Image (cartoon, helix red, strand yellow):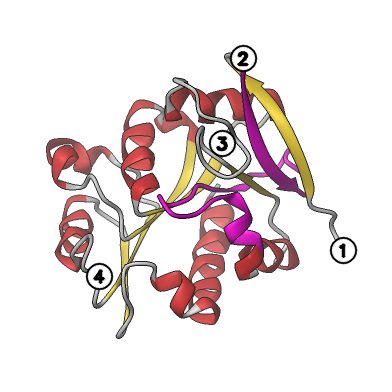
Amino acid sequence: MQPIKNETIAVNGSPINILMAGDHSQTPLLFLHGKAFQAETWQQLGTIQAAIDAGFPILALDFPGFGKSPESDTTPETVINGVLEATGIKSIIMVAPSMSGKIAIEYALANPHRIAGLVLIGAVGVQENRENLCKLPPRTLLIWGENDQISAPANGALLNREIPGSEFVIFKNAPHPCYLEQPAFWHDTLLNFAQKVTKQN
């Protein structure tokens, strides 16, 4: 069994808490988190172990002010780039729910060379970035809860129209954090997509 390491990386003097496992010379899954959650959420849900069991290296981080990372003025883009540089990771499959969906959209637009694949779950910030959505990578998986009251499934449909080649999956009868409600379906959906991405790279 791959050990899951808990480490702290300094980015612009700001301590950033991370979880990591596996061989990061391969493309890892990078797990971001929503507003009410943290890196450890993915461990508690079993997502990190499911990814490891499927053969994927993983990385999860706490943004400043969340989990074990103290508050700072360091921007999310700087945090992500700092963590990738410190760990020697060149490209990622970025997994981003809710609040971090906006971060991921804007990060992918600014750093396309880093993105091997993108997984957006009930992402916010879709309308604010509407003019540039077509520039997001075609290897994008869009996941929405059918009953999402925070970011309507129409946002997922818009992304699906704007990103040629993207996949759009609705979790039936699920709320905004649909992955928490249907973890088995979530893990199957995520890992099937990640396997396709790694075969294409």
Residue 13, label in figure: 2
- To which residue does mark 1 refer? 1
Disc number lying in front (2 or 3): 2
Earlier sequence position, callout 1 versus callout 2: 1
**Spot occupied by residue 129 in the image (x, y as percentages of width and height):** 18, 38
Earlier sequence position, callout 3 versus callout 1: 1
Residue type at the position of mark 2: Gly
Picture layout, residue 147 above or below residue 75 = below
Q: Residue furthest bottom?
A: 173
| Structural distance between the alpha carbons of marks 3 and 4 | 30 Å
Q: Secondary structure at mark 2?
A: loop
| Structural distance between the alpha carbons of marks 2 and 3 | 24 Å
Earlier sequence position, callout 3 versus callout 4: 3
**Spot occupied by residue 99 in the image (x, y as percentages of width and height):** 35, 48
Picture layout, residue 144 above or below residue 166 = below
Of residues 93 and 21, the one drawn nearer to the viewer in this rendering: 21
How crowded pointer 4 is (Cα within 10 Å; few <14, some 14-19, many 20+) is rated as some
Disc number lying in front (2 or 4): 2
Q: Quadrant of the N terminus?
A: bottom right
Viewed as shown, does residue 160 lie left or right of 47?
Answer: left
Marks 1 and 4 close (CB-CB < 8 Å): no
| Structural distance between the alpha carbons of marks 1 and 2 | 33 Å
- To which residue does mark 4 refer? 148
Report the magenta residues as a range: 14-43
Residue type at the position of mark 4: Asp
Q: Secondary structure at mark 4?
A: loop
- To which residue does mark 3 refer? 91
